Image: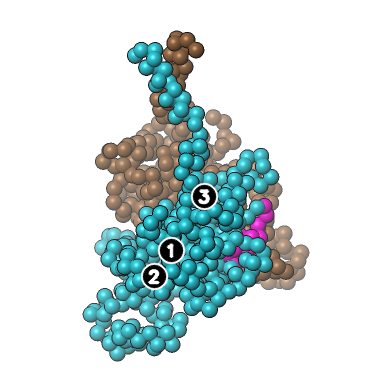
Chain colours: A cyan, B brown
Amino acid sequence: MTASRVNKVFWLLVLLIVVPHSVVSALEDPLQSWNEGPVKTALVTFAEKITKEGGPDFVPPAERIAVFDNDGTLWAEQPMYFQLQFALDRVKELAPQHPEWKTKQPFRALLEGDKKVFSAGGEKYLLEVLAASHAGMTTDEFDGIVKNWLATATHPRFKRPYHELVYQPMIELLAYLRANGFKTFIVSGGGVEFMRAWVEKVYGIPPEQVVGSMGKQKFEVRNGTPVIVKLPAVDFVDDKEGKPIGIQKFIGRRPIFGFGNSDGDLQMLQWTAAGSGLRFMGLVHHTDAEREWAYDRTSHVGKLDKALDEAMAKSWTVVDMKQDWKRIFPFNER
Amino acid sequence: MTASRVNKVFWLLVLLIVVPHSVVSALEDPLQSWNEGPVKTALVTFAEKITKEGGPDFVPPAERIAVFDNDGTLWAEQPMYFQLQFALDRVKELAPQHPEWKTKQPFRALLEGDKKVFSAGGEKYLLEVLAASHAGMTTDEFDGIVKNWLATATHPRFKRPYHELVYQPMIELLAYLRANGFKTFIVSGGGVEFMRAWVEKVYGIPPEQVVGSMGKQKFEVRNGTPVIVKLPAVDFVDDKEGKPIGIQKFIGRRPIFGFGNSDGDLQMLQWTAAGSGLRFMGLVHHTDAEREWAYDRTSHVGKLDKALDEAMAKSWTVVDMKQDWKRIFPFNER
């Protein structure tokens, strides 16, 4: 090797070692789908403060816990929760094996498309549909059923698989927090096993960092093979007061960063806010009827009323989707 | 800079980059408290196989989940589960505030040291003591109570704080697995909040990687401050059939590595074994009456009977504590 060639290799190595990652990544804005404004500034300022070693707001990496609601915060939730659509599709698929459903409510109403009768049945009907669609199989079988549904079903408005209706700015935020040493968790009212089937691939959040509602389960050995069977009974509802309890049970450490979009997230944000030191509480406000949907105080899905009042009273960060998001879904043009 | 100086710096850089970490760490054996023998060989061989990229047994880092029982596997459990000792100490401490306990069982028996009456009460008495000692306070208060107990109570035989009665070889094994890309979890019949108060410091396992038994909890806002209150009711028992269910609920991914020491761990090991690809199932067999304790098939604490038979039938790894462990506790001489 000539000295000049050694020199070239040498400087290349120096470059690779010395140039900090932050300089390289600054070339591409990690939050590029967020418009400049107070929300983006608040996010970046928070991350900078809590990672600044020796600074007054420094938080050790082990305590950098961030929690996110899922429906309406990380992916869309209109015209109905996607998991409910999954349950309805599942009932239709199973109907041939259940001739009795032709006359038995709430299945009859569902199969005949009678939304009025189904809605009138309230929580009781909902639980019956969830039991019929989410229980009676092993956890491995259920995982396969969810994956198959996501691979085949499409959203009525956007004509795309449901897992494409995730919010690009939030995916960037998850990655940005992780790059700043955070562990990112989902804390959702949705079913934990429904989410675990796909969130790792889509959000980069592993199954063990997903907290959600769950049914009871039973362990048994079938012909020498151990299986876990999903039972038709509710075990835990991870919504409202259930969210801080889910955080305490599953994570066991109070988050310093929380993001939601509805009144179901209020207690999670209160719990996040009540710890000591710097904290970040955020809400996604759905204000973009054109690119997504616009709804809040009177919506039957993702109602945002009390939490919006509290966010304003306490100066939590509220994302105005129309204003703050340059891009909504990954499939939107940059 | 002269070409010769450039040359020196160049080779230094090459050295820093090229010499693999494994060579450096081989200077100090990461499993130095394990005697050479089939168990140590099995552990190292397993780690090498599943981390060998391109090899037939390679497992991607995200799937490297290792689960460990706690009592009798990571720390001692004689002459009684340490958490039960905590509960008894707590009852004594609270007694002055509960004059009615002087005549009310099981508290009277405990305060008078009448083990016979207490034992005769079985699970009912045990649950009453757990409720009196583990509930009625906030989660933050309980955390402080446990930390204070660990800082002041000492083990009757070893005259040391309980958290010093952890097994040095297992602490090395936890670190070794993490160095090989594993996420290490505790899956214990013990109370999840009792463990979370100290396991991060002692084992390097963060609270969010602890699965355990738990009581019901309630979220409420007290004078503007949100708290979570521990209720005197059992929510989940993470033992026997409960262990694979706890794994499914909290981790959501099947482990490839499991370690226990009693029949309470059998289903966890069966669940670990039943996945595809290479797996490691281990049991600690307490065979060292001199340095620790010797017990198995007839012990009332940590009974090891069916699991030992199954381990032998299926060629799982069984640690013979006397034979395989050079050192038991960190305070033992090297």
Tell me residue B202's x, y (percent): 57, 44
Q: Residue at x 47, y 51 (%)?
A: A32
Image mark 2: chain = A
Of B49 and B293, nearer the camera is B49
Range of magenta residues: A267-277
Label 3 SS: helix
Kindly identify which residue carries mark 2. A82
Tell me residue A206's x, y (percent): 42, 53
In the rendered image, which quarter is residue B24 located in? top left
Marks 1/3: CA–CA distance: 18 Å
Image mark 1: chain = A
Q: Say which amino acid is labelled 1.
A: Trp
Marks 3/2: CA–CA distance: 26 Å
Kindly identify which residue carries mark 3. A177
Tell me residue A78's x, y (percent): 42, 72
Tell me residue A294's x, y (percent): 48, 72
User: Is disc 3 on the same chain as disc 1?
Assistant: yes
Label 1 SS: loop
Q: Say which amino acid is labelled 2.
A: Phe
Image height check: is A121 above or below A29? below
Q: Can residue B234 be seen in this view?
A: no
Give the mark, 3 or 2, whose residue is nearer the N terminus.
2
Q: Which mark, by number, is residue A75?
A: 1
